[in-house]
Image (spheres, helix red, strand yellow):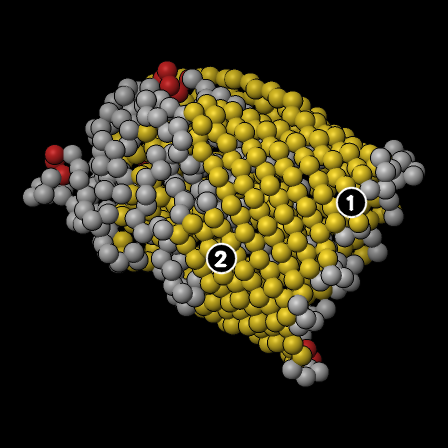
Amino acid sequence: MGRFNAVQPQIFIRGIGSTDQSASGDQSVGVFIDGVYMGRTGFVDLDFFDLDRVEVLRGPQGTLYGKNVVGGAINLITERPSETFDARLEASIGNFDRRSLRGLVSGPLAETLAGKLSLSWTERDGYATSATTGQKLSDEDNVTVRGSLLFTPRDDLDLLVTADYSRDRLAGNNRECLGEQFIFFPWFAPGSPFAPSPCSPDPFLNEKTVDGFQDRDVGGMSATLTWDSNLGEVTSITAWRKGDYDIQEDFSGSDAPLVVRNAIDEIEQFSQELRLADQTEDGRFNWLVGAYGYRADIERIENNDFSGNDVPIALLLLEVPPGTVPSFNTFYFQENKTTSYALFGQGTWAFTDDVNLTVGARYTYEKKKADIRGAGFDPTGGFLAAPYDISASKSWNAFTPKVTVDWRPRDEVMVYFSVAEGFKSGGFNGTAPDGIAASTPFDQEEARQFELGLKSELLDRRLRANLTAFHIDYDDLQVFQLVDGARLIVDNAADARSRGIELEMLAQLTSAFSLSGHYAYLDTKYKDFINEAGVDFSGNRLTRAPKHSYNIGATYRADLDARLGLTLHAEYSHRSRVFYDPSNFALIGDSGRGLLDARAVLSLRDHNVDISLWGRNLTDKVHVTQAIDGRGPFNLSQNAAGVIAEPRMYGLTVTWRGN
């Protein structure tokens, strides 16, 4: 998981993910909050004080619930309102003047009604500084509120209604140019007034001409009805979400007046899901069928400002006709309407006490209607060749089956083999250089995954060991990339593959001491990919796909006496080098990344208070979470412009529990 900015987290599983933020772009890895699909990544990066658990499902999903996803799913499940009174209050302080207050109260409101309210507030100074203005960059300023009501009028019926809102007002990213010096157009040559300085050796001193900002308001409501009917368990999930983003960022990370990118998004989505599940009386066959509908309306305005004058963002709200846009500015006005319908189902037969066969399938229909207008003047000729105003629509459909066989040679061991197919619809490039390119859709993406696995709990369940081997073939993999050093577009790789091995272990060595670990080997490549500029990337590794990654964690829990408890936890995670572009350009300084986190918790049991000392990235490793290839005909830099991740963070947290 990386972060382009506050509204663009980039999530990859087994080398597959998405970075496209155009109005018609979809995510390869879907995120679901309490069963609700988040259609835009800006809905995802929220503060959850009431988070109950996280589920990560790898590979194609879609036969059991929700929206179809091709690369995997992350399910965030929050706590339901409690039947008994529960309250928590948490206060934190940390370096860079971090302050945080979070609170939760949950419990019964009436005989058949329970409620929950969760609040959080976080502020932190930026960990980077603008050399141009002195402003702090990459800060935190968030307020989040979430409330739920649980109605249980009968033993066989309950209705959960949830509403949430989150607000961010952030400074710009710490995007830094990487390389020894910059090479530009002739008018940027040394000695000219526009000549840039060399990239700073200090990764937290930023030379970019515009500090930028990141404003986000997101929220929504959902209603989940569960009814144990005579036909089976009926589940209905109705949800509505809305988001508004306002982002400004200097793409080059340098002190040259190059490209400043402005973007405004207004998103509204509605989804409805119905499921019916049951099993036979003998329990040897259980099944589920469902239907899903989704509608998203997205308006997005992007502006590339080459003027160096920091054009006010309010200008983006004007319907600027061609010829009246300020010099050295390009605008893309995008409107996209996505409609998606699906039928899905899955059944599991227990042929014997040891062998199960699971068969599932999904049929998906999706249609996208795009209105895109490009206007303005582009001094490079690469971003906008000529003004245009187009309307286009396209529909896609797919049948995606899944088959799994699992065998339990003993109660503590399960071996399984699975074949699953996934699908992601195509779309339209929102920042195309001309009308023909804007009205030409990119194709749907399809995947077929083969997986062989072993899951076990051994030594009286003190050792959990899981081993998985997988192979995924992709047809028309959608790749978001910088083309010709100027245009960010989605292109289809004809064929790609991802295969690897994953090992997970958890060992309870003593009653007080446990160890956990994970190792993954990942072999990926574009088997056949020549992009629209004619560059051949065949044989290159997929982006965000480390060849080796592992983590190891240790936890120690002890009773100091009857009233005091101590918990110590440390975790080290490492990944080998990754590439941020199909060209596989080597990012300066990225030979791999290792991060050490730790936490010590003292529990005062008589007072229901935990005092925690914590630290992240304790070795102060400098690393990049996202990068743009700065080379090419326009030579933004000798290497890249990268977002530098957090340095060492540490703090103190006090938590009180009132239950």
Residue 461 visible in the displayed image: yes
> Which residue shows up at 42% across the image and 17% down it?
439
Quadrant position of residue 525: top left
> Which residue shows up at 84% across the image and 35% down it?
351
Decide: is 249 above or below 571: above
> Which residue shows up at 59% across the image and 50% down it?
503
Of the numbered discs in the image, which one, if any, rests on residue 253?
Answer: none
> Which residue shows up at 59% across the image and 38% down it?
470
Is residue 283 shown left or right of residue 508? right
SS for callout 1 = strand
Percent from the top left, x then y, of residue 83?
Answer: 79, 59
Q: Nearer the viewer, residue 339 or 525?
A: 525
Mark 1, Cα crowd under 10 Å, few <14 / some 14-19 / many 20+, is some
Of the numbered discs in the image, which one, if any, rests on residue 408?
Answer: 1
Quadrant position of residue 385: top left
Percent from the top left, x then y, of residue 408?
Answer: 78, 45
Determine the residue located farthest toward the right in the rendered image.
281
Give the CA distance from mark 1 to mark 2.
32 Å
Picture quarter with the C terminus: bottom right
Is residue 323 shown left or right of residue 159? left
Indicate which label's residue lies in the foreground, 1 or 2. 1
Is residue 161 shown left or right of residue 594? right
Determine the residue located farthest toward the front in the rendered image.
409
Task: Look at label 2 and name its amino acid.
Answer: Ser
In the picture of the structure, the residue carrying the numbered disc 2 is 573
Quadrant position of residue 579: top left
Task: Look at label 1 and name its amino acid.
Answer: Arg
